[in-house]
Amino acid sequence: MCGIVAYIGHREVYPILIKGLQRLEYRGYDSAGIAILNGDLKVFKKAGKVSDLNDFAKGKDTGGTVGMGHTRWATHGEPNDRNAHPHYSQSGKFAVIHNGIIENYSSIKAELIKRGHTFNSDTDTEVLIHLIEDIHDNAGVTLDEAVRLALGEVIGAYAIVVLSKDNPRELICARKGSPIVLGVGKDKQEYFVASDATPIIEYTNNVIYLNDGEMAYIKDGQLTVKTIENQVKTPYIHELEMKLEQLEKGGYDHFMLKEIYEQPRSIWDSMRGRIDAKKGFLRLGGIAEYENKFINAKRIVIIGCGTSWHAGLVAEYLIEDLARIPVEVEYASEFRYRNPVIYEDDIVIPISQSGETADTLAAIELAKSKGATIFGVCNVVGSSIPRATHAGAYTHAGPEIGVASTKAFTAQVTVLTLMAMQIARHRGTITDSRYHQLLNELEAIPAKVEIALKTNDICKELAAKFKDAKNFLYLGRGYGFPVALEGALKLKEISYIHAEGYPAAEMKHGPIALIDEEMPVVVIANKNETYEKVVSNIQEVKARKGKIIAIVTEGDTTVKGMADYCIEVPEADDILIPLLSVVPLQLLSYHIAVMRGCNVDQPRNLAKSVTVE
Ligand code: G6P
């Protein structure tokens, strides 16, 4: 969702802002804008893409070395030029960019209108900068103090940057609920501010993550960090491991395709240093630290959204199967508002690629307030979720730019597999031979994913055949069921074809009514314990003339004899099948979306990082 980039230093700021906004495009947005301080406080903003903003600014005076830029994903007010950020204060002396929602904006707005303020947009954000100016002028305080006092009055979530025409060497930013990363430039003489590290990494890998309720104030090259309650903090400078090449397409047409192809590597990275089959070694440091909690847990609750929720469903099967602890998997957005029963000895596992999903963060806070132990599984290092949890494991998939999650999903499933095995080992619920067999199989997975990627050509052929379908059904059982859900989600997200994932046997209770000769039905039919049952479900679809596309285990002959099309993936233990069978589903949806002319990496209306509820 909204993206923030800002800079204060000695370099020309415009190229930094435009490039930064392009790096933030992946988060999802519908308008963009920048403000530059140079004698005046100049704002340029436009609905549409960053390239539209760049065209609009061409030929205009964009000189200056202090500025900020924003990509807006509309919440309050439609996505047009007027509602795009930055927003000015009443006098035009101050400007703000904002990510989040000011929930009590209407009462503040009503009060400010009584005091003579007029507003130029329908946004909640504009209210904030008017409030800051009102406090600044009436209380006679410095700008940073006015920002601090204003933030004390607002309810909601925010990451903001404020600039002032009268204070040209000053930049203020603050966060609560939405992320802010500060990049510390050479000799601490220049600072970058952004929603995530992607706009910063080109210039520096020294970063400071602002904590919730903190603000940073940069004046004449001096950085001060304090809380909204006015307590000064000593910021810790982290070193980023991200590489610039990870943010480039590297010869691929789309980030999504690049990320699909990165999976043999990213899966390996998620296991690196954590397993060694020869030595019988498996260790996730975070779990080892909370060993007793896991051994004694009566229940594990997994929370997540979107693809991460699907990884959670795989984990439910894994943990119950191997570690014999009851698991519940919940949408974070439901969990946080339904007054769930949470015990102090529960372990809650939030799963998140971005580490910034607002609903997941709120669900964590709720579970924490009830005394549960929170163990996060997250991809983005230093993001809000890992910092809100007691312990956790990073998935180390590297930056994922395509909105449709691919390599992050397989890395999540890998880490969750390791987690289930480690807990099972601690609890004594896995035999030695099964443990060692699984370690060997896990180490073999990256090479098998490499083979699964060879299905690209057949996936492309099938995409050409089915790209005009109106609906798709995805069916699976056992470990194949979450894969079916994930396959359907991938297709919906990027090709805008309606698709449903269903447990294969449940099909009889509804979706079977939809099946006719027009309906492609993708069935996850790998050789496993439910194979025979899935074969029966395929017959049920065939009998109604549905077109079967089956994902099968190499060498399968039974399903091959009855399906219209088969895609073979290597054989693997049942519990590892999601890592292989999801690959052709990712490729199929990718090719369908490309053939339909869709914007694969930035599908309409979707955001990569959903920072509002
Ligand atoms: C958005 C993204 C999905 C992602 C979901 C959860 O909807 O487009 O790809 O699965 O958010 O995000 P998280 O970062 O918490 O995994």
Image: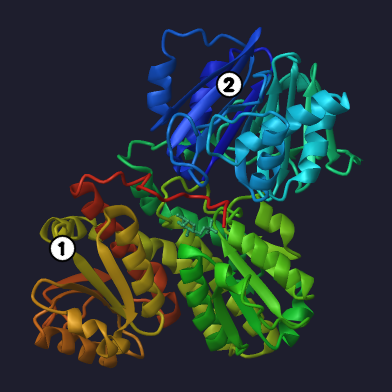
Whether residue 383 is visible here, answered yes or no, is yes
78 displayed left or right of 388: left
Q: Position of residue 89 (x, y in %)?
A: 66, 25
* Quarter containing the C terminus: bottom right
Number of numbered labels in the structure image: 2
Q: Which residue is mark 1?
A: 469
Q: Which numbered disc covers residue 35? A: 2
For the point 13% across and 55% down, which residue is it?
Answer: 464
Q: Nearer the viewer, residue 226 or 186?
A: 226
Residue type beneath disc 2: Ala
Q: Position of residue 492 (x, y in %)?
A: 31, 60
State yes or no: discs 2 and 1 in contact (Cβ < 8 Å): no
For the point 45% across and 79% down, which residue is it?
Answer: 575
Placement of 345 over or under 217, stated as above or below: below
Q: Which numbered disc covers residue 175? A: none
Q: Secondary structure at mark 2?
A: strand
Placement of 244 over or under 484, stated as above or below: above
Is the CB atom of the residue marked by disc 2 within 8 angstroms of ligand 1's nearest atom? Answer: no
192 displayed left or right of 447: right
Q: Secondary structure at mark 1?
A: loop
Residue type beneath disc 1: Ala
